[in-house]
Image (cartoon, rainbow, N blue to C red):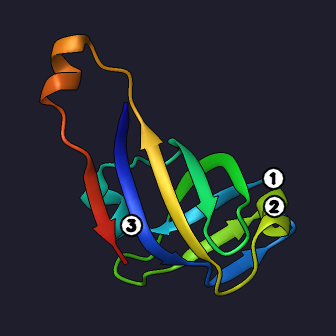
Amino acid sequence: MCKSKIVGARVSGKVMGCSGSIGIDAEAMEKVDILQGERVHVLNQSTGARFETYAISEKSGSKSIILYGPATRLSEIGDSLVILSYAIFSDDEARESRLKVVNL
């Protein structure tokens, strides 16, 4: 089930010389319950590209979205992103769960 969604995210930086990840404002991660190292699915609304990576936290309140490593080749500064995370729930948990959404 989709458990978390960050919309209105804009790529604010790119660092090519890393193994890969996406840096997300720590405040936004906390609001939607995305943990450091958690797998995320990134949808680039500007290009249609989609990729998976893991989340790392950036400075709280910065609204920073930084791409690291190979992901830098799939987006440009200013591109609009949707960032999703998923969880495995039992049937009962799935029926009770509510999608957490934050708009940057």
Q: Position of residue 2 (x, y in %)?
A: 38, 38
The residue identified by callout 3 is 26
Which sits in the foreground, 66 or 11? Answer: 11
- Residue drawn at (23%, 12%) of the image: 91
| Relative image position of residue 68 (x, y in whole percent) | 74, 64
- Would you identify the image quadrant in which residue 1 lies? top left
Q: Amino acid at mark 1?
A: Ser
In primary-sequence order, the first of circles 2 and 1 is: 1
Q: Considering only vertical position in the picture, is 82 above or below 78?
A: above
Q: From mark 3 to mark 2, how far is it between C-alphas?
A: 20 Å
Q: Amino acid at mark 3?
A: Ala
Marks 2/1 in contact by CB < 8 Å: the verdict is yes
x, y percentage for residue 99? 25, 46
Between the residue at mark 1 and the residue at mark 3, the CA separation in whole angstroms equals: 20 Å
| Residue located beneath label 2 in the image | 69
> Contact (CB < 8 A) between labels 3 and 2?
no
The residue type indicated by label 2 comes to: Gly
Mark 1 touches mark 3? (CB < 8 Å): no
Which type of secondary structure does the marked residue at label 2 adopt? helix
Observer-nearest residue: 48 or 82? 48
